[in-house]
Image (cartoon, rainbow, N blue to C red):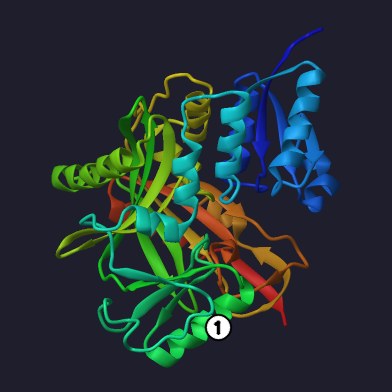
Amino acid sequence: MDLLKTIIFIGTNKSGSSREAIRAAERLGYFTVLFTNNEKQIRQRKEYIDVHEMIFVDTTQLAAMRKEIRMLISKGSVIMTIASFVDSHVSKASQLCAEFCPNGTSYKSVAIMENKAQTRTFLQGLPYSPKYITVSPKARLNAKTLESLPGFPLIVKSASSTGSKDVLQATDLEQLQRHIRKLTEKNPEESIIIEEFIEGEQYLVEAIVHDRKLHIAGIIQQEITFGKRFIITGYGVLAYVPKQLNNSIKQVLESIIEKFDIQNGVMHVEMRQTDDGWRLIEINPRISGGAMNNMLKAAFGFDLVEETLKLYLGQRPSLVQKQRNFVFTQYVIVEKKGILEKVTGKKRARNSPGVVEVYVKPKKGTQLTPPLSMGHRYAYIIAQGRTMELAKGLAKKAAEEIKFHLKE
């Protein structure tokens, strides 16, 4: 019997980092298996040619997935690693990996990072931790409850929020109570975090930890559009990082690695730079989704999802920079609701100077909406330049070509 060297992926999006990881596994010569509970993916099976076997299973249930893994093993699969690049599945993948193919990653630290309330508690008292309180969904709020926090505005979020979905700003007590009611209706059992609003430039740091050693893959400045939610619409990858900035970021990340006791792992960390040093916005135990992998490839020439897979396979990841370009990614959002009739300007955007990639997500007939989460960003343009200003200007100019024609 031929033994199949297999990588199991739990969940994927149709595009972005999670899909590129499956393609990377195929490129590296592994048999790829996708566990999905998304019926649409089963219907669109033909569009996932890089997935060698797609299994419909309840990805919220470890027992159901264990059963499928045992069946694969009985049919001759050698499970090399089990991974997920989709938030909410990462700790389950990590736990199953520890059971079937241990690779030195700690699923306990991954599980804490997946829960924002647990992360805040775990890092409490460290200089970069913002002031916060956690309240139970049924708690009655008054001025006394908020005593330990600075004044309004405050940030309110659900403990398991991802992609800006359940992150809201409150400017007074009444609005705060309204937000809490709204979050409680959505997740009645979920605790809620109320924390200080932090002013300052926001950065995202992509990193790999191998044998307890930190390897920074990229430091990215973020541009935030504030409508009903905080949506990140611009990302600037720094080709050259000022020494002081790099060292101060490294210090925070090394402290996180030590605190979580991470031997091998992957994370992206969002932080704001304030007059009093760094403040941690959030940590996620995976590469960012969307265009992140392609941004870093355009900037430095390495493939972060491929190197992440190598780490999960027990190999040494390599983040050697083959090039250094300033890269800016501009996301496109819509300002009003409507059904998509057509998209124009893709070709003009692709042919614009400095443009590396143009991606448009929705198909004709899709309902588009102003952004309530990162999932409501409908296209992106990646551009390179000799300076950040140039890369940003080229990406924004090309993005203006993309037009979504909607019918209300």
| Residue 80 shows in the view | yes
**Nearer to me, 400 or 48:** 48
Quadrant where the C terminus is found in the figure: bottom right
x, y percent for residue 398: 48, 59
The tally of labels here is 1
Give percent across and percent down for residue 384.
39, 46
Residue 10: image quadrant is top right
Q: Quadrant of residue 152?
A: bottom left
Quick one: which residue is furthest to the right in this view? 43
Q: Quadrant of the N terminus?
A: top right
Left or right relative to 351: residue 241: left
Mark 1 crowd level (few <14, some 14–19, many ≥20, 10 Å Cα): some
Helix, strand or loop for disc 1:
helix
Q: Which residue is mark 1?
A: 181
Quarter of the figure with residue 261:
top left
- Kindly identify the residue that appears in the image at 76 percent across and 26 percent down: 70
| Front residue (pair 310, 339) | 310
Residue extending farthest to the top is 1
Q: Is residue 155 above or below residue 317?
A: below
Is residue 392 shown to the viewer in this render?
no
Nearer-the-camera pick, 368 or 247: 247
**In the rendered image of this protein, does residue 170 appear above or below residue 283?**
below
Q: Position of residue 244 (x, y in %)?
A: 14, 46
List x then y, in percent, for residue 289: 53, 49
Q: Is residue 12 left or right of residue 253?
A: right
Left/right of residue 47 with respect to residue 349 in the rendered view? right
Q: Nearer the viewer, residue 399 or 100?
A: 100
Q: Amino acid at mark 1?
A: Arg
Q: Is residue 100 above or below residue 76?
A: below
